[in-house]
Image: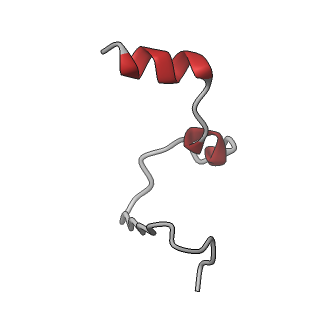
């Protein structure tokens, strides 16, 4: 049980990490306002 009520849950598994493992990868999950605007205007 991952919690968070009725939220959808997606689990992705990769044989090898595609992200930089020497840095905090959790920041990849957070979008800045600038990121959001860039994607919305794409």
Q: Is residue 30 left or right of residue 35?
A: right
Q: Which image quadrant for residue 16?
A: bottom left
Q: In this view, does 26 lie to the left or right of 36?
A: right
Q: Is 31 placed above or below 21 here?
A: above
Q: Which of 25 and 7 is in front in this view?
A: 7
Q: Which colour scheme is used?
A: secondary structure
Q: Which of 14 and 40 is in front in this view?
A: 40
- Expressed as whole percent of the image width and height from the top left, the position of residue 3 reads 63, 77
Q: Is 36 placed above or below 34 here?
A: below
Q: Which residue lies furthest to the bottom in this view?
A: 1
Q: Which of 19 and 40 is in front in this view?
A: 40
Looking at the rendered image, the quarter that the C terminus falls into is top left
Q: Which image quadrant for residue 38?
A: top left
Residue at (39, 68) in percent of width and height: 13
Residue at (65, 40) in percent of width and height: 27
Q: Which residue lies furthest to the left in this view?
A: 42
Residue at (39, 22) in percent of width and height: 39
- Expressed as whole percent of the image width and height from the top left, the position of residue 12 reads 39, 65
């Amino acid at each position: 049980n991952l919690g968070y009520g009725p939220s959808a849950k997606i689990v992705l598994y990769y044989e090898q990490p595609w992200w930089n493992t020497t840095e905090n990868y959790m920041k990849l999950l957070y979008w800045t306002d600038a990121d959001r605007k860039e994607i919305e205007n794409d």
